[in-house]
């Protein structure tokens, strides 16, 4: 399985900025907290020291995760995607739930950028996978916990 993460140029910039901030400012801040807690003497019963070490551990985990994402990221420029009616990453897709007759609109993004509250749907989600490569007018059928649901693709708009 590929570790490639497809992201927008803007998201790559945000990740690189966060990584820089964590490696410079956040690491220095945690180091100061550890040094300050050490100066209070007995480390065996020093809650501040334990908390600072835990904060350092979480920080290093986040840094490692961001480094993996940035190293494996492939920046996609939406303007370079084919100009047809197919669903690709960064497309906005308007769907009709044929069971409930309700419309919904999602923009397909990488798992790293997904945020269902902002209608940003991961291309690796079951619905995202089912939509990729489909055309306007096609109907897809999804198995959901409440049974099968059919979605009709009403429109596809290019992102970016």
Image (spheres, rainbow, N blue to C red):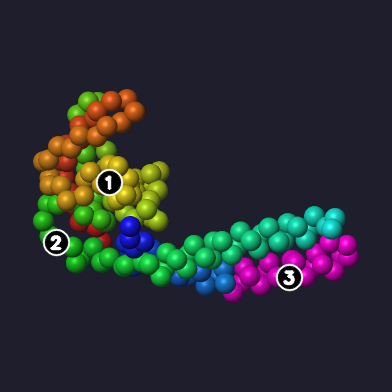
| Residue at the (23%, 63%) spot, across then down | 78
Q: In the rendered image, which residue does mark 2 sit on?
A: 82
Q: Secondary structure at mark 2?
A: loop
**Residue 104 placed where, x, y %?**
27, 38
Label whose residue precedes the other's in the sequence (2 or 1): 2
Calculate the distance from the C-alpha at mark 3 to the C-alpha at mark 1. Answer: 44 Å
Query: In this image, 155 relative to 71: left or right?
Result: left
Residue 113 located within the stretch drawn in magenta:
no
Image label count:
3
| Residue occupying the point 14% across, 37% down | 139
Residue occupied by mark 1:
128
* Quarter in which the N terminus is drawn: bottom left
Instruction: Give the secondary structure at mark 1.
Output: helix
Going from N to C along the chain, the mark reached first, 2 or 3, is: 3
Seen as rendered, the residue at the extreme front is 1
Q: Is residue 96 visible?
A: no
Q: Secondary structure at mark 3?
A: helix
* Magenta portion: prevailing SS class: helix
Mark 2 crowd level (few <14, some 14–19, many ≥20, 10 Å Cα): few
Q: Residue at x 61, y 59 (%)?
A: 58
Quadrant including the C terminus: bottom left
| Residue at horizontal 24 percent and vertical 30 percent from the top | 149
Q: Is residue 26 magenta?
A: yes
Q: CA–CA distance between discs 2 and 1?
A: 18 Å
Q: Mark 3 packing: few (<14 Cα in 10 Å), some, or many (20+)? A: few
Q: Quadrant of residue 15?
A: bottom left
What's the magenta region? Answer: 24-43
x and y percent of residue 47 in the render?
80, 55
Q: Image height check: is 50 above or below 148?
A: below
**Residue under numbered circle 3:** 32
């Amino acid at each position: 399985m590929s570790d490639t993460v497809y992201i927008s140029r803007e998201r790559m910039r945000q990740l690189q900025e966060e990584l820089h901030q964590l490696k410079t400012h956040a690491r220095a801040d945690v180091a100061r907290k550890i040094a300050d807690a050490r100066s209070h003497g007995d480390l065996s019963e020093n809650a501040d020291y334990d908390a600072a070490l835990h904060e350092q551990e979480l920080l290093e985990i986040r840094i490692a995760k961001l480094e993996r994402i940035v190293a494996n990221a492939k920046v996609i420029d939406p303007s370079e995607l084919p100009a047809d009616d197919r669903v690709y990453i960064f497309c906005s897709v308007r769907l009709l739930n044929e069971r409930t007759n309700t419309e919904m609109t999602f923009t397909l993004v990488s798992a790293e950028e997904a945020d269902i509250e902002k209608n940003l749907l991961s291309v690796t989600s079951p619905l995202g996978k089912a939509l990729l490569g489909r055309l306007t007018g096609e109907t897809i059928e999804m198995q959901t916990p409440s049974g099968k649901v059919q979605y009709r693709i009403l429109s596809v708009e290019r992102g970016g």
